[in-house]
Amino acid sequence: MTDPSTTAPQRWGITIPLAGVPLMEHMEWFRELVDLGFTDVWSAETNGTDAFTPLVLAAVWAPTLRLGQAIVPVYTRGPALLAQSIATLADIAPGRAVLGIGSSSNVIVERWNGIPFVEPYKRTRDMVRFLREALSGEKVTKVYDTFEVQGFKLNVRPEIQPSILVAALRPGMLRLAGTDADGAIIHWLSAEDVAKVAPIVTGQGDDKEIVCRIFVCPSENADVVRAAGRFAIAAYLNVPVYAAFHEWLGRGPLLQPMWDAWKAGDRKAALAAIPDEVVDAILVHGSPASCRAQIQRYFDNGVTTTSLAILGLDPELKHSQAVRDLAPSAT
């Protein structure tokens, strides 16, 4: 039995934990998110909280929210532990748990966790296939291309099987998200880019979910937002997997000066080389009404679920008010 809510159109999600709010002070916020019209909360696992604890709290404090990760790296938890983690969440919140996994990046996997970042496509594919078997309750004894499992059987079998989504950038992983998983998680792209990306996933089945983590700063102080946004863009788009993604999207000529300066060690020149049009394409900013209109374009081009990540690029921005200004109820 699968969760029928995964194909619901235009689900509005938000990234948690919310900036500046201690985790144990999220109860009222989770409840307000429901009142504001948000349907989902999406965690992440980089260098802050782990991907599951905030969702467990949300499961208890706001029992209508759908709970997902964008994302859990497929390297940093072993296969059995990852299966246990999502099975536990699915047992706590039947029908509301979604597992979002992905290869992550060499920075997180190798530099921060000391794990070789090799064969990311195969590792992700193997993890999806293992999880399908393990979550069904079957004993798994199998040699995959990137790992081996001998005699593992989950003692917790979810009443409703959680959907599995794959974080994807380029065609190979996007197709995998459509063929082996229930859809894709995408980010660091424009609304117009979605029109190129989404069909590769939905071409494998029109019931596939497309979750997009959208970086938003509802501020009309464009110069301040662009200046701060360049730091975020440089931090990500110089990572090899994201550089290759944007080259595939066609931004190579626009970003090549930044890449050249970055490789030369000139961080100041690299930041200065990022054109305004790149910032404006992949970071949503402007008035709240303008931001909501830009978010709608993501939906129009194929996104089914958003995970808004509100960035404090403008020091005058009040995060709590930004959440309310961007909410579905504000439209």
Image: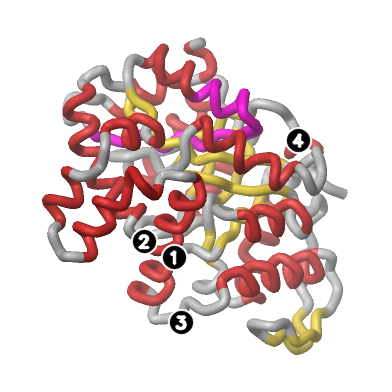
Which amino acid type corresponds to the residue marked 2 in the rendered image?
Val
Discs 1/2, front: 2
Type of the residue with mark 1: Ser
Q: Which residues are magenta?
A: 295-313
Regarding residue 56, the answer to whether it shows in the image is no
**Depth check: 136 or 168 in front?**
168
Number of residues whose C-alpha sits closer than 10 Å to that of mark 4, classed few (under 14), some (14–19) or many (20 or more)? some
As helix, strand or loop, the secondary structure at mark 2 comes to loop
Q: Residues within 10 Å of mark 1 (few under 14, many from 20)?
A: some
Q: CA distance from mark 1 to mark 4?
A: 28 Å
Q: Is residue 116 above or below residue 298?
A: below
Q: Amino acid at mark 4?
A: Thr
Where residue 116 is drawn, which disc sits there? 3
**Is any atom of residue 108 visible in this view?**
yes
Q: Residue at x 43, y 72 (%)?
A: 109
Classify residue 281 by image quadrant. Answer: top left
Mark 1 to mark 3 CA distance (whole Å):
11 Å
Residue 310 included in the magenta stretch of the image: yes
Residue beneath label 2, please?
Answer: 239
What sort of colour scheme is used for the picture?
A: secondary structure
Give the number of the disc on residue 7.
4
Distance between the alpha carbons at the discs numbered 4 and 2: 32 Å
Q: Which mark is residue 105?
A: 1
* Disc 1 + disc 2, Cβ < 8 Å: yes
Q: Earlier in the sequence, mark 1 or mark 4?
A: 4
User: How far across and down, in percent of the image, does residue 157 sit?
Assistant: 79, 63
Which mark is nearer the camera, 1 or 4? 1
